[in-house]
Amino acid sequence: MALTQIVTNVLSALTVIGQVISALLLLSIIFRNRMPSKFLHFSLNNAIFLSFIVALIAASGSLFYSEIAGYEPCKLCWIQRIFMYPQVLILGVAL
C-alpha cells in the first residue's frame, strides 16, 4: 500500500473519531444538568492541548499532501492554510 493511501486512511479515521468526540461533547453540554460528565470536564480542562493536537495534525496533513505527495493546493486550500498554520504556533505558545 502506498504511503499516500496510508496517510489518507489515518487522516480519515481521525476525522471520524473527531466527529464522534464533537457529538459527545455537544451531548454533554446539552445534558450537563441531568448527569455529571467527566468527559466534558476533561475536555474543558485540556482544551488548549486538544486544540493544539488538532491544528498540528491538520497542518502536518496539508504539508504532507503538498510537499511529499505532490498535490497542488487549490485556492480554498490556501485560504484554509492561512488560518490554520498560525494556530499551531499560537496554541503551542499558549501551552
Image (tube, rainbow, N blue to C red):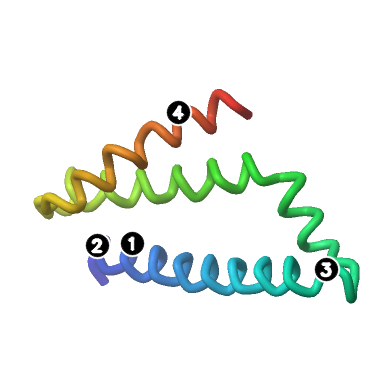
Looking at the image, do the residues carrying marks 2 and 1 touch, with CB atoms under 8 Å apart? Answer: yes
Label 1, residues with CA under 10 Å away: few <14, some 14-19, many ≥20:
some
Residue 39 in the figure: left or right of residue 82? right
Q: Earlier in the sequence, mark 1 or mark 4?
A: 1
Tag 1 residue: 7
What x and y, as percent, mark residue 91? Answer: 53, 33
Tell me the element at label 4: helix
Q: Earlier in the sequence, mark 2 or mark 3?
A: 2
* Residue in the picture at 41% in, 66% down: 10
Q: CA distance from mark 1 to mark 4?
A: 23 Å
Looking at the image, do the residues carrying marks 3 and 1 touch, with CB atoms under 8 Å apart? Answer: no
Going by the numbered disc 3, the residue's amino acid type is Arg
Q: Earlier in the sequence, mark 4 or mark 3?
A: 3
Residue 70 visible in the picture? no
Q: CA distance from mark 2 to mark 4?
A: 26 Å
Tag 2 residue: 4
Q: CA distance from mark 2 to mark 1?
A: 5 Å
Q: Quadrant of residue 81?
A: top left
Tell me the element at label 3: loop
Tag 4 residue: 89
Going by the numbered disc 1, the residue's amino acid type is Val
- Of circles 2 and 3, which is in front? 3
- Of circles 1 and 4, which is in front? 4
Q: Quadrant of the N terminus?
A: bottom left
Mark drawn on residue 51: none
Residue 40 visible in the picture? yes
Q: CA distance from mark 2 to mark 3?
A: 41 Å
